[in-house]
Amino acid sequence: MIFLAIVGIVILLLAVWLISSYNGFIRLRNKSEEAFSAMDVSLKKRYDLIPNFVETVKGYAKHESQTLEAVIKARNQAVSSTTPEQKIANDNALSGTLKSLFALAEGYPDLKANQNFLSLQNQLSRVEEEIAGARRYYNGVVNKYNTKTEMFPGNLVANLFGFQRKPLYEVNSDAERENVKVSF
């Protein structure tokens, strides 16, 4: 009788632990999806600003069409991304082309004095700050989730219920880490 009671208590404790661990994974997964969604809202703001920004620059830098076309192409690829991995990769590419656009603007004093350009540049800077904050939050939540999926005994529950690692939002290449070179 005592043996059955001990076995029952052990089974009950294991069930409580399993339910608690599973719910912890669900909570972290939902928080990471919420964080990605919040970041996506800021990215959408950026995507909406870029065409206006490019049009403003285009009026002053007509012979720089290659840079402007690269920005629009990168924006369109980022907008059409369907998976988090694609969105991260395409957004990193867009960030690189935006750096080129800002560097291009440095060579046109009239453009830098244009109020529309300055307003768009300020809006874009604010959105970039929002994106950076959202990326930090997303990476923090994903890091907790990934750690839980890999550490014992959480990895047992993760494997049992199919919880997989999520991608961190990282700069992917050395070229993106370098400063933009401006030369006239």
Image: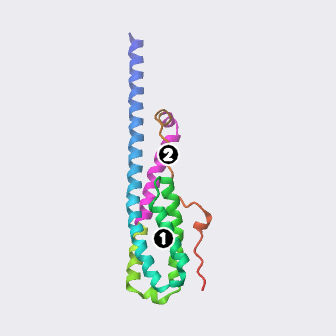
| Residue 146 badge | 2
* Res. 118 image quadrant: bottom left
- Under mark 2, the amino acid is Asn
- Labelled pair 2, 1 in contact (Cβ < 8 Å): no
Residue at x-position 38% and y-position 29%: 16
Position in image of residue 75 (x %, y %): 47, 67
Position in image of residue 18 (x %, y %): 42, 31
Residue 26 lies, with reference to residue 125, above or below; the image says above
Distance between mark 2 and mark 1 Cα atoms: 34 Å
**In terms of secondary structure, where does tag 2 sit?**
helix
Q: Is residue 105 magenta?
A: no
Instruction: Name the colour scheme.
Output: rainbow
Rate crowding at label 2 as few (under 14), some (14 to 19) or many (20 or more) other CA atoms within 10 Å.
many
- Residue 141: in sight, yes or no? yes
- Under mark 1, the amino acid is Ile
Position in image of residue 140 (x %, y %): 45, 53
Q: Which residue is mark 1?
A: 72
**In terms of secondary structure, where does tag 1 sit?**
helix
In the foreground, 21 or 114: 114
Residue at x-position 46% and y-position 50%: 142
Disc number lying in front (2 or 1): 1
Q: Which portion, as a residue range, is magenta?
A: 130-156
Q: Which quadrant would the N terminus be assigned to in this image?
A: top left
